Amino acid sequence: MGEVATHNDNGEMVKRVVDMRSDTVTKPTEAMRAAMAIAEVDDDVLGYDPTALRLETEMARIMGKEAGLFVPSGTMGNLICVLVHCDVRGSEVILGDISHIHIYENGGISTLGGVHPRTVKNNIDGTMDLDLIEAAIRDPKGELYYPRTRLICIENSHANSGGRCLSVDYTDKVGELAKKHGLKLHIDGARIFNAATALGVPVDRLVQAADSVSVCLSKGLGAPVGTVIVGSKSFITKAKNLRKTLGGGMRQIGILCAAALVALQDNVRKLEDDHKNAKLLADGLNQITGLKVDNSSVETNIIYVRVCENSNTTAPKLSKSLEENGILVMLENTFRFRVVIHHQITTSDVQRALSCIQQAVTGASSEHAEK
Ligand SMILES: *Cc1c(COP(=O)(O)O)cnc(C)c1O
């Protein structure tokens, strides 16, 4: 079963590690390293790095927007987009209460941009109810004491909802709502290609209603570093200024962009396999007594696994025992862990992981029985 051994860089046999902590853990492929080695580069702060320009143009074309900008991380991408749309301090942004921007980005929009977050409850599928969004929009006539709403942010796929996807129809409706009230729409599209793949729609159609999109290169796409933000030409001009202000002006970034171009070419089409492997894993996990996955939530590559309270193990015990067998998962809390599939996890890796997990759970039960 499955390849258990593999070779390290020195050609020695080592145990193959199945790293499912996140889709950020992928290593650059040989094709990426080769492209990086021969990448044409120049000073991108001066605006001359040809490989960076090629990546930015290509991403803008794929997303159906006028222009793109390479930034060091998804966090900086979202920060720049929010701050450009909300260029007056004290602006308000409407966003999901468990969105990545609100939970995991150090509150940067407030500390650095003076932007006030107005959260709306994220439903279990990652959406926010349209009527709740509309109700959260401030009445501009109440300007004596209201901050001014300027932006709505949505996230697709929605990480904290287990990678669930927002549909074209929903996205268009949020876009219409934004337009009706003179607001902008930003999509945190860290995993927008996963969403487009799972929904079976062209990615440019999926983001058509957005004024800006932030697309991670180092999640499912498997590039080592970076994000590209896209939007109108005038938006990207302002974004470039802000990137410099934030210390994100970088010089010979063609090295990084070359890897990202390979990722776009080779890895987008692999996302479908990732999603199949995720479903396979979710189905297998559900057959293990003591574990529970909400199958309906597994639309893309993220799986949240519940360790039932009446089982004889806990998530920390399980993850430690798996680690000893070269299977890495992300611990969430006592009763929950997360696994994420990416292009360097094969179907046989999934099968090996399932049998290790089964053994770890069974082992814990028999240990318990002996006591
Ligand atoms: C990973 C991620 C980001 C950005 O993360 P960085 O680690 O800063 O690149 C933004 N939004 C979502 C939904 C993400 O999953």
Image: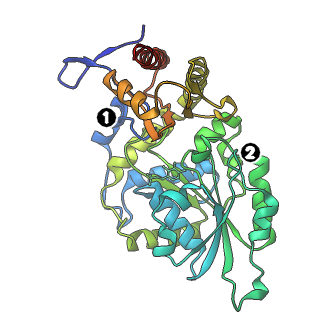
Residue 82 rendering spot, x and y as whole percentages: 56, 68
Marking on residue 34: 1
Mark closest to the chain's N terminus, 1 or 2: 1
Residue 205 rendering spot, x and y as whole percentages: 71, 47
Is any part of residue 21 visible from this angle?
A: no
Q: Residue at x 39, y 50 (%)?
A: 51
* Front residue of 127 and 233: 127
The amino acid on which the numbered mark 1 sits, given as a three-letter code, is Ala
Residue 85 rendering spot, x and y as whole percentages: 60, 72
**Few, some or many residues within 10 Å of mark 2 (<14, 14–19, 20+):** some
Residue 4 relative to residue 156: left or right: left
Mark 1 → mark 2, Cα distance in angstroms = 37 Å
Residue 299 relative to residue 265: left or right: right
Camera-side mark, 1 or 2 = 2
Q: Residue at x 60, y 41 (%)?
A: 163
Residue 73 relative to residue 168: left or right: left
**Which quarter of the figure has residue 118?**
bottom right
Picture layout, residue 128 above or below residue 284: below
Marking on residue 274: none
Q: Give the secondary structure at mark 1.
A: helix
Image quadrant in which the C terminus is located: top left
Residue 37 relative to residue 333: left or right: left
The amino acid on which the numbered mark 2 sits, given as a three-letter code, is Ser
| Residue bearing mark 2 | 167
Q: Residue at x 35, y 69 (%)?
A: 247
Q: How many marks?
A: 2
Is any part of residue 361 visible from this angle?
A: yes
Picture layout, residue 209 above or below residue 181: above
Residue 132 rendering spot, x and y as whole percentages: 78, 63
Query: Which residue is outermost to the bottom?
Result: 144
